[in-house]
Image (cartoon, grey):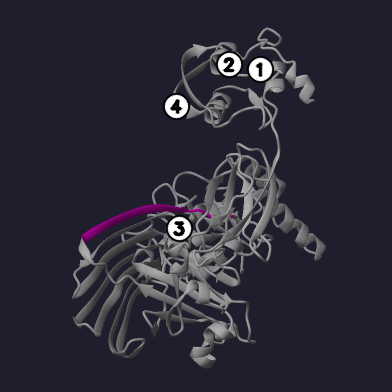
């Protein structure tokens, strides 16, 4: 194959060129990047061996609407490379004379890899930069052996140390000194008794980057699913304001699921973190096994979640603003039978029990044809009460700064979400579902003396929620069991339709039974004083006070019904609804749910 490529000559007429021309303007760019740009502008793919093409050669090229052949002639002018068009492939080779004049000789190199203390490092990975699939590792004495070409570059990498690229440059012995990566070695994690260097942590725990928590959801518990190994998040309802997810670490360990919840600490105090704004979080750690949670005793048996809010930075005031929008859409809505199918199945069920038909074929046919939605209704109740999607918005504004004696952080946040219910407009009051929350976070750290630290934190939120007077469970239960042959939600004059046996349909439950308005507020406060007694030894004391308030106003009413009349066909257990106008009464079947 190499011999075949060596005899290739530049030929552009062997295959039809792509209709699309090439436009490039590059200055001193590696040829490998130029080839990538050509591939993006055309349907061609370059094929070559690494030892044939010098991928590090710098290229300056400017062409406008040129065919591929003209571009390749300029690109490889004055080089030892040849090219050939073969369908969609551009095969790059090397001329016979150049291949014979510059044979590549493999050189065996060896060396020792040490750290800054001149100690050998075991298991350092050495790879050829241009051929990353070829490499080796150092032995117990830090030595390595590798066959390379004289002009290649080696890459040395090791955990906790900075990666280095070293050129062989014809050498046979290449010794390397690895430098520590202080950013990794100095990284710390929050543990039960403070902070500890990440490299020395032996317990099973995990830290989540705060940027991964900044998702457009009202409840922070919803943003943890799928982000932590061993963590299970179960959300049982999506109703705004009641959408907390149940969190379990490494499964449910008791017969009672409620007793398997992990211990959650916000700034060192057992609290719920559902309503904490993600922008105000500085660190988020999860302790999983017994060695990590032992300091908490039996309360840490189901795992521990530790959250610390931001405490400010020294320097000038630094402002930050974040705004996000999100959409919520049902993943699956149950498909229901239409009105005609429902009546056919009702007839079949009645006949199998020795009864007669409940609906005539004429009514079934007219319902299927959709002749009159008031005389022959065919209602999909899920579509009547649910939107295709709902929208939520969130915003956060914060400032942090300070000096050597004091640092501060102040954050204000707002969240607004509408429910999935449609606006029925059946009443002059607002029964739509919405949830609005206002958060405030303020942390102050004082250092009045060199060995004394005082931390004062006050956080809280105020939330306002609105719901229909009928519960979510009753609305969806009615949507599941109300037959599609019940009257449509409204007559043309805006009045509600009749309801069989005094039952009301889900649309009326949603918009004509009243509303409930709720206010919730919570304030967290904590004061911590730390006094250093000796280097490495300090004593700390903390006082915290939390308060929670909840107010709910519920206003209910019974919808007004239009007059109901018995059907003339006494054999059918149904009721009629009299719509306005000169229409004949329609049939409404009874349904006891």
The quadrant in which residue 182 appears is: bottom left
Q: Residue at x 81, y 65 (%)?
A: 354
Where residue 227 appears, x then y in whole percent?
54, 64
279 to 132, vertically: above or below: below
10 Å neighbourhood of mark 3: few (<14), some, or many (≥20)?
Answer: many
Where residue 172 appears, x then y in whole percent?
64, 46
Q: CA distance from mark 3 to mark 1?
A: 64 Å
Q: Residue furthest front?
A: 172
* Dot in front, 4 or 2: 4
Question: Considering the numbered disc 1 on the image, is that residue within a helix, a strand or a loop?
Answer: strand
Disc 4 or 2, which lies upstream in sequence? 4
Disc 3 or 1, which lies upstream in sequence? 1
* Dot in front, 2 or 3: 2
Q: Which residue is mark 1?
A: 83
Q: Are marks 1 and 2 in contact (CB under 8 Å)?
A: yes
Quadrant where the image shows the N terminus? top right
Q: Which residue is mark 4?
A: 28
Magenta-span inclusion, residue 460: no
10 Å neighbourhood of mark 2: few (<14), some, or many (≥20)?
Answer: some
Judge whether residue 15 can be spotted in this image: yes
Q: Which residue is mark 2?
A: 72
Q: CA distance from mark 2 to mark 3?
A: 62 Å
Question: Considering the numbered disc 3 on the image, is that residue within a helix, a strand or a loop?
Answer: loop
| Predominant SS of the magenta segment | strand
Q: Which residue is mark 3?
A: 421
Residues drawn in magenta: 317-331
Q: CA distance from mark 4 to mark 1?
A: 22 Å
Judge whether residue 137 can be spotted in this image: no
């Amino acid at each position: 194959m190499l011999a075949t490529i060596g005899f290739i000559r530049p030929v552009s007429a062997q295959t039809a060129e792509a209709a699309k021309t090439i436009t490039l303007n590059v200055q001193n760019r590696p040829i490998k990047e130029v080839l990538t740009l050509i591939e993006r502008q055309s349907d061609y793919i370059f094929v070559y061996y690494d030892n044939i093409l010098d991928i590090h050669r710098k290229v300056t090229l400017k062409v406008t609407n040129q065919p591929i052949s003209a571009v390749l002639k300029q690109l490889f002018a004055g080089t030892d490379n040849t090219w050939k068009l073969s369908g969609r492939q551009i095969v790059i080779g090397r001329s016979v004379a150049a291949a014979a004049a510059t044979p590549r000789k493999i050189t065996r190199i060896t060396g020792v890899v040490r750290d800054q203390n001149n100690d050998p490092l075991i298991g350092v990975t050495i790879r050829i930069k241009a051929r990353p699939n070829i490499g080796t590792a150092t032995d117990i004495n830090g030595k390595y052996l590798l066959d390379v070409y004289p002009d290649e570059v080696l890459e040395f990498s090791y955990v906790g140390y900075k990666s280095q690229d070293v050129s062989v440059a014809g050498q046979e012995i290449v010794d390397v000194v690895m430098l520590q990566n202080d950013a990794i070695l100095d990284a710390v994690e929050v543990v039960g008794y403070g902070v500890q260097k990440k490299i020395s942590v032996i317990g099973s725990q995990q830290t989540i980057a705060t940027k991964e928590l900044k998702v457009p959801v009202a409840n922070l518990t919803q943003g943890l699913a799928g982000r932590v190994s061993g963590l299970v998040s179960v959300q049982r309802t999506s109703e705004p304001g009641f959408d907390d997810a149940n969190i379990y670490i490494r499964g449910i360990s008791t017969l009672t699921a409620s007793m398997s919840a992990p211990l959650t600490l916000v700034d060192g105090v057992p609290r719920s973190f559902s309503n904490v704004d993600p922008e105000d979080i500085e660190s988020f750690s999860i302790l999983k096994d017994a060695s990590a949670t032992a300091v908490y005793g039996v309360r840490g048996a189901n795992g521990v979640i530790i959250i610390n809010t931001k405490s400010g930075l020294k320097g000038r005031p630094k402002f930050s603003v974040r705004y996000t929008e999100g959409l919520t859409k049902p993943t699956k809505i149950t498909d229901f039978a239409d009105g005609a199918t429902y009546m056919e199945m009702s007839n079949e069920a009645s006949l199998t029990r020795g009864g007669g038909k409940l609906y005539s074929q004429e009514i079934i046919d007219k319902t299927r044809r959709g002749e009159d939605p008031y005389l022959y209704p065919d209602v999909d109740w899920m579509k009547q009460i649910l939107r295709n999607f709902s929208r939520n918005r969130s915003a956060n504004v914060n400032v942090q700064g300070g000096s050597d004696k004091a640092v501060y952080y102040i954050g204000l946040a707002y969240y607004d979400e509408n429910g999935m219910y449609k606006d029925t407009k059946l009443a002059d009051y607002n029964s739509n579902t919405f949830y609005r929350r206002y958060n405030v976070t303020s942390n102050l750290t004082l250092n009045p003396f060199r060995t004394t630290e005082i931390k004062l934190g006050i956080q809280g939120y105020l939330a306002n929620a609105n719901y229909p007077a009928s519960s979510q469970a009753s609305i969806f239960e009615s949507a599941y069991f109300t037959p599609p042959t019940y009257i449509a939600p409204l007559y043309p004059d805006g009045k509600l339709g009749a309801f069989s046996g005094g039952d009301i349909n889900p649309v009326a439950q949603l918009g004509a039974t009243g509303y409930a308005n709720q206010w919730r507020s919570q304030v967290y406060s904590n004061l911590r004083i730390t006094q250093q007694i000796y280097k490495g030894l300090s004593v700390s004391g903390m006082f915290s006070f939390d308060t929670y308030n909840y107010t709910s106003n519920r206003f209910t009413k019974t919808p007004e019904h239009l007059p109901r009349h018995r059907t003339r066909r006494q054999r059918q257990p149904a009721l009629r609804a009299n719509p306005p106008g000169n229409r004949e009464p329609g049939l409404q079947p009874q349904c006891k749910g």
